[in-house]
Amino acid sequence: MKILLVGAGTVGRAAHDALVARGHEVVAAHRTSAEYPIDLTDPSSIQRVLDKVGPLDAAVCTAGTTPYGPWDDLDRDAWLAGINSKLLGQVELVRRATGVVRAGGSFTLITGILAREPIRTGSVAAAVNGALEAWVVASAGELWGRYRINAVSPTVLTESRDKYADAFPGYPTVDASVVGQAFVRSVESMETGQVYRI
Ligand SMILES: NC(=O)c1ccc[n+]([C@@H]2O[C@H](COP(=O)([O-])OP(=O)(O)OC[C@H]3O[C@@H](n4cnc5c(N)ncnc54)[C@H](OP(=O)(O)O)[C@@H]3O)[C@@H](O)[C@H]2O)c1
């Protein structure tokens, strides 16, 4: 399959490696990409990349950021930043990608453990992940018969343990290779409306 993959960080590499190992053609896009620059907060850049890649079998997103900070410090601007990037950015990617992903194709989004197990400083991330997971389930119903849509919702990746050690003390981690397989499952299975909590 020809798959657009947005995001080339720790999760993006996990998805990329797993999908390529399955023989898929993966077109990688991220903010600083030379060939496929995309900023989820800029709908026109999403459209430019979709127009350039052409017909697709699937779109996968592993990008989108949310601010972290003490509850009292997360003001309206912080909320808008998180909503605009990880939530609306992924929604906009799917909305626009229905124009280039073939009928019967799929969308796979990234959420995360904070939707179900909050941490200190993570209230915006928790809300954004939760909203995305609700939207994926709702969209699966409305897209029924046309497209499949799922979300991958991992705990901290083993490869990111050092980066998040203070924020996620004692949390179990999941290997990138396991996370990569969740993207393979979403893309290749018949499942829709699933949130893969790993
Ligand atoms: N790592 C974990 O343990 C973990 C666990 C659960 C959930 N998640 C979620 O997974 C997602 C990715 O995390 P990560 O650890 O892979 O991050 P990361 O290593 O920092 O990589 C982020 C990637 O996304 C791209 N990106 C960031 N903002 C973007 C935007 N507005 N538009 C387009 N591309 C953008 C970056 O592109 P550039 O490099 O070009 O800027 C980079 O390729 C996040 O939403 C995170 O909450 C991560």
Image (spheres, helix red, strand yellow):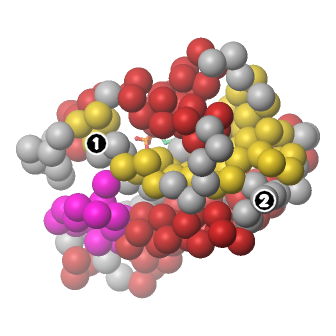
Q: Is the N terminus in the top left, top right, bottom left or bottom right quadrant?
A: top right
The one of 84 and 22 positioned closer to us in this rendering? 22
The picture quadrant where one finds residue 49 is top right
Is 73 rendered above or below residue 155?
Answer: below
- Please say whether residue 118 is one of the residues in the magenta stretch: yes
Residue identified by numbered label 1: 156
User: In the rendered structure, which segment of residues is drawn in magenta?
Assistant: 113-126
Where does label 2 land, which residue?
145
- Secondary structure of the residue carrying tag 1 is strand
Q: Earlier in the sequence, mark 2 or mark 1?
A: 2
Q: CA distance from mark 2 to mark 1?
A: 33 Å
**Residue flagged by tag 2: what amino acid is it?**
Gly
Q: Measured from the top left, where is residue 148 in percent x and y?
A: 69, 53
Left/right placement of residue 118 relative to residue 61 reads left
Callout 1, which amino acid? Val
In the picture, the disc for residue 92 is: none
Q: Residue at x 29, y 71 (%)?
A: 123
Most foreground residue, 170 or 73: 170
Q: Give the residue at x 52% y 61%.
A: 86
Question: Height in image: 64 above or below 92?
Answer: above
Tag 2 secondary structure: loop
Residue 90 image point, x, y percent: 62, 59
* Label 1 residue near ligand 1, CB within 8 Å: yes
Tell me whether circle 2 and circle 1 mark residues in contact (CB < 8 Å). no
Task: Report the side of 55 relative to 186 (left or right).
Answer: right
Is disc 2 surrounded by few (<14), some (14 to 19) or many (20+) residues within 10 Å? few
Residue at coordinates 15% horizontally, 45% vertically from top-left?
171
Which sits in the foreground, 111 or 65? 111
